[in-house]
Image (tube, helix red, strand yellow):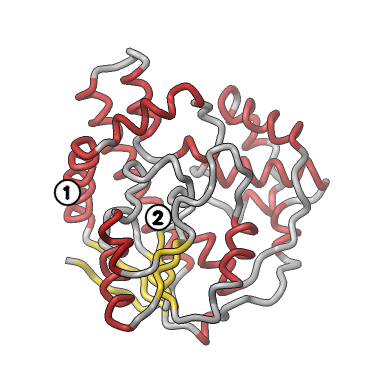
Amino acid sequence: MLIAGPTASGKSALALELAARDGRAVVNADALQVYECWRVVSARPSLAEEAAAPHLLYGHIGRDAEYSVGHWLREITALLSRPVVIVGGTGLYFMALTEGLAGVPPVPPAIRAEADRLRLEDYPAMLAGLDPETAARIDLRNPARVQRAWEVLQASGRGLAFWQAQTGPALLPRARSEAIVIQPETDWLNRRIDLRFDQMIGIGALEEARAALPHWDPARPWARAIGAPELVAYLRGETSLDDAITAAKIASHQYAKRQRTWFRNRMRDWQGLALP
C-alpha cells in the first residue's frame, strides 16, 4: 500500500493505523526523514509510534552521507517481500517506485560544489543553463529539482529529460499497488501546519537546530528541512524567535502548496482521500 500526502496532512498516522491493523511495516518515502539529525524538525514518527509497528528507512542516514532517490529505491527493493505501507511526501520517490528510475550518470563532486554555489549566488543563471526539454518538464520553482537537472546536464552533456526517457521497468507498477493520495482542504492544512510547528518548538526543534549549527551548510540536502533555515537564522542572531517561527510556518505553507500541485499533476490515477 502507498500513501502520499502533503506535510502535516495526517498520512503518517493513517499509515501507522493500517500497519498496526494488518501486521505491516511502515516504510518511509520522505527525503528529509531519512536523516538521523532531524527527528523533530522533519516530523518523523515518535519513539512511541515506532514502537507500535516496525518503521523502516527513518533516520538511518548521517547528514554528510550522499543519498538520493536511487539509494532509496535500492534500499526499498529488499523490503517489498514483506507486507508494508509506504508513506511520505516526496513524490519523486513514489514515481521512481511505480514508474521506474532513469539511469542518470553520477555527478562529480566538483560539479556538485559548483552547483551548490550557483544555486545560492546566481539562481537565474542556473535556470538559464538548463536544456529546454528538461526546463519544460520540471518545476522551475523548486531549487532542488533545478539544481539536479543542471548537475546532470553539466556532468553528462545530456539533459535530465534525455535520461528520463531511458527509464527502466518499475519496481512496483502502479497497476499492482493500492495507492492513496491525501487531498486536504488548504485552510485546514495550514492550521495544522501552524499548530504542529508550535508543538515542534515545544518538543525540541530548536535544540535540533542548535546541534546542527556547527555543521550548517545551506547547500546540503539535509539542510533543506522545512523550518531549519529559519531556526538557524534565529540562533545566529539574524532574527527574533517569533519572526523565525512565522517565517518557518510560511515556508511550510508554500512547501505544502508545491506538494499538492505536484500530486495533482502526477498522481491523477491514485485514489484521492479528501480531508477534513
The picture quadrant where one finds residue 154 is top right
- Which amino acid, by three-letter code, is at mark 2? Gln
- Which amino acid, by three-letter code, is at mark 1? Arg
Q: Where does label 2 land, which residue?
A: 259
Going by the image, does 17 lie left or right of 238? left
Identify the residue at image location x=32%, y=49%. Answer: 43
The single residue placed furthest to the front in the displayed view is: 51
> Is residue 18 depicted above or below 90 in this figure?
below
Going by the image, does 153 lie left or right of 34? right
Q: Which mark is residue 200?
A: none
- The residue lying toward the viewer, choosing from 2 and 79, is 79
The picture quadrant where one finds residue 10 is bottom left
**Are there few (<14), some (14-19), or many (20+) residues within 10 Å of tag 2?**
some
Say how many tags the image has: 2
Going by the image, does 243 lie left or right of 156? left
Q: Where does label 1 land, which residue?
A: 191
- The residue lying toward the viewer, choosing from 195 and 157, is 195
Identify the residue at image location x=68%, y=77%. Answer: 169
Q: Are marks 1 and 2 in contact (CB under 8 Å)?
A: no
